[in-house]
Image (spheres, rainbow, N blue to C red):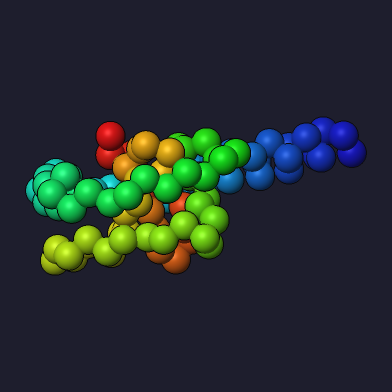
């Protein structure tokens, strides 16, 4: 019974890890250039959010205002949090890329 439980647990862990890797955000180099240029030209005020470590996958609170990137085919939003500019998935509010 313990061996079966271990096997099921190991399989779940591996499957979960694979799914997490599959969710990595891929931004084409051309699109990344457009995003960086836009964010550089349209700087926004820094928002201080205590107790939030800015990293890919971190969720931002609803109180943080996300800014639209006015470029074709860009669905992500951006914000400067604690001095770091990040791209955010507006649906999940999770950081998908650190720009600085």
At x 31%, y 61%, the residue is 67
Residue 47 appears left or right of 4: left
Q: Is residue 100 visible?
A: yes
What percent of the width, then of the height, locates residue 75?
A: 28, 64
What percent of the width, then of the height, locates residue 92?
A: 48, 61
Instruction: From the viewer's side, name the closer residue of 86 and 91.
Output: 86
In the displayed structure, 73 sits above or below 100; it is: below
Residue 35 appears left or right of 82: left
Residue furthest to the right: 1
Residue 92 appears left or right of 24: right
What percent of the width, then of the height, locates residue 83?
A: 37, 37
Q: Quadrant of residue 52?
A: top right
Q: Quadrant of the C terminus?
A: top left
Instruction: From the viewer's side, name the closer residue of 45 and 80.
Output: 45
Count of all numbered marks drawn on residues in the image = 0
What percent of the width, then of the height, locates residue 51?
A: 60, 39
Residue 32 appears left or right of 87: left
Q: Quadrant of the N terminus?
A: top right
């Amino acid at each position: 019974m313990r061996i079966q439980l271990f096997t099921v647990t190991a399989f779940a862990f591996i499957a979960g890890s694979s799914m997490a890797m599959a969710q990595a955000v891929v931004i084409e180099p051309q699109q990344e250039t457009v995003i960086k240029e836009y964010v550089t030209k349209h700087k926004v005020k820094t928002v201080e959010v205590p107790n939030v470590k800015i990293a890919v996958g971190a969720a931002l609170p609803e109180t943080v205002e996300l800014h639209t990137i006015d470029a074709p085919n860009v669905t992500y939003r951006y914000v400067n949090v604690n001095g770091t500019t990040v791209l955010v998935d507006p649906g999940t509010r999770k950081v998908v890329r650190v720009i600085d």
